[in-house]
Image: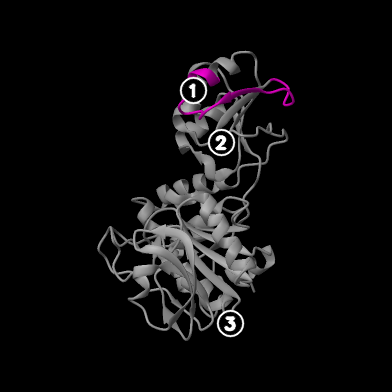
Amino acid sequence: MRETLVDLVEISGAQIVSVVGLAKNTGKTTVLLYLIERLGAAPGTLALTSTGRDGEAIDEITRKEKPSVTVREGTLATTGERSLGQEAGLTVVRDTPYTTATGAILVVRADRKARVVLEGPTTTAEMGRLVAELIEREGARRVIIDGSLDRIAAAAPGISDGVILTAGAVLGPDVDTVVRKTRHAVDLFMTGRSTVAAPRVSGVSRYCAASADGADWEICEGSVITDLSAVVGMLQKRARYLFVSGALTDEVLETLIENDLCPVVIANDATRLFTSERVSARYAQAGGAVRVQRVIGLIGLTVNPHNPEGIDFDPDGFLGAMRQGIPDVPVFDIVREESGGIQTRP
């Protein structure tokens, strides 16, 4: 019998797990409910939060119905002050200094099986503090973060110990396109660790650094995006390595290619990588490479063959294609499980 997704969460030892959707309607909420049901059996063992808002009956953007987030008795969750009035069976444990569009973020506990609208902070720093508080102050044994690709920072090492990605038919017009797009997203998450340590710079939030030997660094304060010309100037002094503290984009890599500069670009972690499949491939073909200081623990990938905006895929064919195209990551279709968490057949 294959290991289930829950088995892999347990085996990973991850105390903080982010569920990240590669787009809307990839089945992220369904995966969240799956984990809640199987990981939250004992009161007080599970806490839930979100990088945005999840659990509302109607999606605020698409205006379509969404599956509600229902939790077991004893489960901790964070929600907005005004969202709390919509739900029964929840008791406020404490308030927090963080706010959303629906007021202050509150920590609540389910008195019984109850529905909750998950809301949490949108900044990385606040999410990190909130998660630490849920563990240290409230005693949660595991925290699940409801995330999304546009707020991917919650998946960063230091906030999350492990990540589950969700992909679906909504990502493209055909199976091959979806597999290719998902393969690229997985490749970004699995970017290898740098063998060169980045320089330590105090008192500066954004900086770039270039080095010929990986030991002596020239520092440029600012973002690689806004100070790209200065970065190019540093690299033209025969630098082999470039460290960027912020985001790495297509524009940056394309500029490096145009200037015949192909250093090893080092980012903090994969949540800072926003490069397309096309440009990433061009940079690699030109002789460049991208590495990270801290790797992200990718636990697994789930797939959703249903496309509410178009044509559904054949579930078996889609699952088989994803497993064949992404063999290095466990792939699950949890909706089609035949019994309590068993991975579906290839």
Label 2 sits on a secondary structure element that is loop
* First of labels 3, 2 by sequence position: 3
Residue at the limit of the structure toward the bottom, as seen here: 112
Relative vertical location of residue 158 with respect to residue 68 in this rendering, above or below: above
Residue 257 left/right relative to 199: left
Q: Is residue 5 above or below residue 199?
A: below
Rendered view: 201 above or below 78: above
- Asked whether 260 or 147 is in front, the reply is 147
Q: Position of residue 110 (x, y in %)?
A: 48, 81
Tell me: 136 left or right of 121. Answer: right
The residue that mark 1 highlights is 228
Q: Is residue 67 visible?
A: no
Dot 3 amino acid type: Pro
Query: In terms of secondary structure, where does tag 1 sit?
Result: helix
> Mark 2 — residue?
205
Q: Examine the residues drawn in magenta and state their main secondary structure.
A: loop
58 vs 2, left or right, is left
Q: Which span of residues is magenta-colored?
A: 212-231
Q: Residue at x 64, y 71 (%)?
A: 141
**Three-letter amino acid code of the residue under disc 1:** Leu
Q: Residues within 10 Å of mark 3 (few under 14, many from 20)?
A: some
Judging by the rendered image, the residue that carries numbered circle 3 is 43
Magenta-drawn stretch contains 66: no
